[in-house]
Image (cartoon, rainbow, N blue to C red):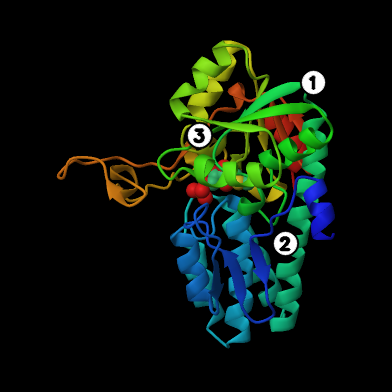
Amino acid sequence: MTSASLTQTHDSIRAVQWCGDYLRLLDQRLLPAEEQWLDCHDAEAVTQAIQDLAVRGAPAIGIAAAWGVVLAAQRGTHLDQALAQLRAARPTAVNLMWALDRMKARIDAGADAAALEREAQAIQDEDLAANRHMGELGAALIEPGSSVMTHCNTGSLATSGYGTALGVIRAGVTAGRILHVYAGETRPWQQGARLTMWELVRDGIPAKLIADSAASHLMKAGEVKWVIVGADRIAANGDTANKIGTYQLAIAARHHGVKFMVVAPSSTVDMATASGDDIEIELRDAAELLSVAGRRTVIEGAQAWNPVFDVTPASLIDAIVTERGVIEQPSAERMRAVFAA
Ligand code: MRU
């Protein structure tokens, strides 16, 4: 696709780029102030980029990790060690483990560096195709002329491109179903303010930023018909781990009669995890809460608790959209019907 046609479909950003013998990542820590690329030449650098959130978002970290395995193979690094390091980079998004399991299966089958490169490219390409398909499926659920709300960043930056929840929003805007988007700022790291607004403004999608704490007020005013979010891991019963703050949005949405949609590729579905109670929630450094843009905002000596994901129970979700289809009112039985091996 040319960059002109990417722009016409509100889709101009590709943040994970394979360059033949290194991985180029748009450094998300610096956006929106600076558009700087980070070049990773080995698996350690990719692991570090995932841990430090230079690359983030469930599908994007899986894709980056797959390229990390290719770099390890190209450089003759011990592959089991690279796989273990990459796997431990972050705990909640299952796409990371899914992509590494897929690469490991190819290694066990005797794949060389060139074959691993083809596998990583397939993982990246399949993600983009899934996003476009989910965009169409999710947008079809939205009544024309609606406004919607989203949380965190689920767009091109968080995936191979186009996005999951933001893919539905891109498709919905292109089809005239979505008129306006409200994005929560997503404290503490501010993925909504720093990244989602950057994507929406760049791609010409009408959007307003709101404070996370303004969401219930927005819903009460009848301003939005759907809350549309991504996911980091969907358990076998439909419980969904996503960015901290998602759960309270689902509660508020149900209270106000606003529909709640989760959009994620099948690589985010973890049928080996029975329910959300079994999902490990990443705790990050308290410093992320105690400072804003690197500047301390809280009295020295104060402590903070910083879980960066929460679990929304399936009972609060109206639809889970995957590339395999839409699961309305998700339950263990409905999930099994689509995802049983
Ligand atoms: O900590 P992050 O920024 O990696 O968390 C990202 C999210 O929670 C996204 O909403 C989720 O990964 C879905 S992205 C398509």
Above or below, 105 relative to 336: below
Above or below, 209 relative to 268: above
Find the residue positioned furthest to the bottom: 76
Residue 120 place in picture, x, y as percent: 70, 69
| Label 1 C-beta lies within 8 Å of the nearest ligand 1 atom | no
Q: Which residue is mark 1?
A: 143
Above or below, 94 relative to 324: below
Residue 163 place in picture, x, y as percent: 69, 47
**Residue 297 as seen in the image, left or right of residue 88:** left
Residue drawn 51% across and 63% down? 87
Task: Please identify the quadrant where the N terminus is shown.
Answer: bottom right
Viewer-proximal residue among 50 and 235: 50
Q: Which residue is mark 3?
A: 311
Above or below, 106 relative to 266: below
The kind of residue on which mark 2 rests is Gln
The kind of residue on which mark 1 rests is Glu
Q: Which residue is mark 2?
A: 124
Mark sitting earlier along the chain (2/3): 2
Mark sitting earlier along the chain (2/1): 2
**Residue 48 as seen in the image, left or right of residue 238:** left
Characterize the local packing of mark 2: few (<14), some (14-19) or many (20 or more) Cα atoms within 10 angstroms: many
Looking at the rendered structure, the secondary structure element under dot 1 is loop
Looking at the rendered structure, the secondary structure element under dot 3 is strand
| Label 2 C-beta lies within 8 Å of the nearest ligand 1 atom | no
Residue 94 place in picture, x, y as percent: 58, 51
Viewer-proximal residue among 25 and 64: 25
